[in-house]
Amino acid sequence: MNHEEYEVMYQVEDHHWWYLGMERITRSLLDQALGQHPSIRILDAGCGTGAVMVYLAQYGQVTGFDYSAEALRFSRQRGHQSLAQASVIDLPYADDSFDLITSFDVICETGVDDEQALHEFARVLKPGGWLLLRLPAYHWLRGKHDVAVHIQHRFTRGELKTKLTASGFAPERLSYANTALFPLVVAKRLSERLFRRNQTGSDLTLDPGRLNGLLAGILSAEAPLIRSVGLPFGLTVVALARKTKS
């Protein structure tokens, strides 16, 4: 990720509609899988600027790591102390160490072998432990946002299911997300290819203004559907899976 994007992320993560909606979806899935178990050990793999770790702490004891020293600097500003600098393809943790791993928009990044990362997640998870992933969907949706945040690959639901299964996970919930706003973003991505645009940063640099609350509500409303029946398409793939191999 471009270094300036960490500053943007740190400034908007607590109030931007996308983060608010994704938090609601994440909490819904974790509440279904875990309930409130403050004794479990949680690893946030690629913790970025640390906002997710704040609400993960309601479910257990959270450790975070990131490859970027800049990201970890912002995480420390949030007050987090259980942090490490590491890569998702070479985790500095013992086998069977964690009950839950979360990893949001990380194994899609440039230079990351997603299959190796999934095997590392399986290694450090306890048998029966949970993995919650969030990843960008559909490679044909690549745009300027992907360049700014170094997204190398976008996933389909079927592809992710295959890779999870091969890595020793049993998918419990696989769904697309950000479905209602899908047509608007598709139009934006296509316009980037047809016309010159001045956008050089990620989509987070685009201020939604007074629409922020409305957009957050639209995305949040998808949470019960993702938790139950799932959504057939969207801008994001969400996977909740359980480790099957000992």
Image: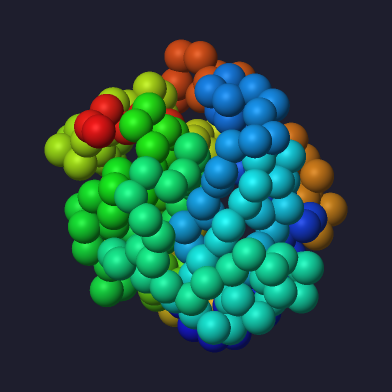
Residue 158 shows up from this direction: no
Q: Nearer the viewer, residue 229 or 53?
A: 53
Q: Residue at x 77, y 57 (%)?
A: 14
- The spot of residue 48 in percent (x, y) is 57, 67
Q: Residue at x 55, y 46 (%)?
A: 42
Residue 175 shows up from this direction: yes
Q: Nearer the viewer, residue 192 or 55?
A: 55
Quarter-of-image position of residue 29: top right
- The spot of residue 11 in percent (x, y) is 75, 71
Q: Nearer the viewer, residue 62 or 26?
A: 62
Q: Residue at x 47, y 57 (%)?
A: 45
Quarter-of-image position of residue 203: bottom right
| Looking at the image, residue 167 lies above or below residue 15 | above
- The spot of residue 155 in percent (x, y) is 29, 47
- The spot of residue 122 in percent (x, y) is 30, 44
| Looking at the image, residue 8 lies above or below residue 60 | below
Q: Is residue 195 left or right of residue 198?
A: left
Q: Residue at x 77, y 68 (%)?
A: 78
Residue extending farthest to the top is 229
Quarter-of-image position of residue 3: bottom right
Q: Report the number of discs.
A: 0
Q: Is residue 189 left or right of residue 5?
A: left
Quadrant occupied by the C terminus: top left
Q: Is residue 134 left or right of residue 166?
A: right
Q: Is residue 147 left or right of residue 51?
A: left
Q: How is the image coloured?
A: rainbow
